[in-house]
Image: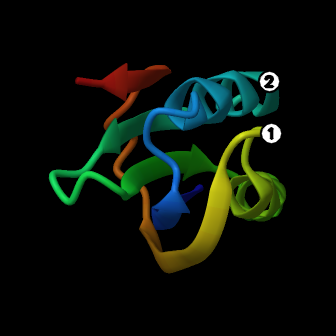
C-alpha cells in the first residue's frame, strides 16, 4: 500500500473538484481525503491504496471534472499508515 499526496493547482475550487475526486476515489476503492487549501485556488488530495490504482487516480486528478482547469499537480509519495477508513471531503 502506498500514499499519494497531490496538490492540484489551477481553477479547481468552486467547480466540484473535491466531489469529483471523492467519487473517483470511492469508485477505485481508495481511502483518504480532499480539501480546499487557504490559497483559494488549490486542492490537497491524500489517497491510500495500491500504486497502480493511485497512478490511475492521478491521471483523473490531472484532468479533473468538466469545469476545472488543472494547471499543475505537485505529487509526493510515501508508505501508508492506513490512517483512513474511507475517502471524504474535509471542510
Q: Position of residue 14 (x, y in %)?
A: 46, 33
Q: Nearer the viewer, residue 40 or 73?
A: 40
Q: Which mark is residue 1?
A: none
Circle 2 or circle 1, nearest the eye: 1
Please report whichever mark, 2 or 1, sits nearer to the chain's N-terminal start.
Answer: 2
Question: Which residue is found at the position 34% from the left and 50% from the top?
Answer: 81
Q: Is residue 49 left or right of residue 62?
A: left
Q: Is residue 20 left or right of residue 66?
A: left
Q: Nearer the viewer, residue 12 or 90?
A: 12
Describe the colour scheme in one phrase: rainbow
The extreme left residue here reads: 38
Q: Is residue 4 visible?
A: no
| Residue 51 position by quadrant | bottom right
Question: Which residue is found at the position 53% from the left and 55% from the top?
Answer: 11
| Residue 35 position by quadrant | top left
> Circle 2 is placed at which residue position?
27
Q: Which mark is residue 66?
A: 1
Q: Position of residue 12 (x, y in %)?
A: 52, 49
Q: Is residue 2 visible?
A: yes
Amino acid at each position: 500500500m502506498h500514499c499519494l499526496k497531490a496538490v492540484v493547482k489551477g481553477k479547481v475550487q468552486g467547480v466540484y473538484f473535491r466531489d469529483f475526486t471523492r467519487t473517483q476515489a470511492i469508485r477505485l476503492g481508495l481511502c483518504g481525503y480532499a480539501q480546499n487549501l487557504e490559497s483559494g485556488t488549490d486542492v490537497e488530495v491524500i489517497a491510500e491504496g495500491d500504486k497502480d490504482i493511485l497512478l490511475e487516480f492521478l491521471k483523473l486528478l490531472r484532468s479533473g471534472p468538466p469545469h476545472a482547469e488543472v494547471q499543475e499537480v505537485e505529487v509526493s509519495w510515501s508508505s501508508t499508515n492506513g490512517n483512513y477508513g474511507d475517502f471524504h471531503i474535509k471542510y
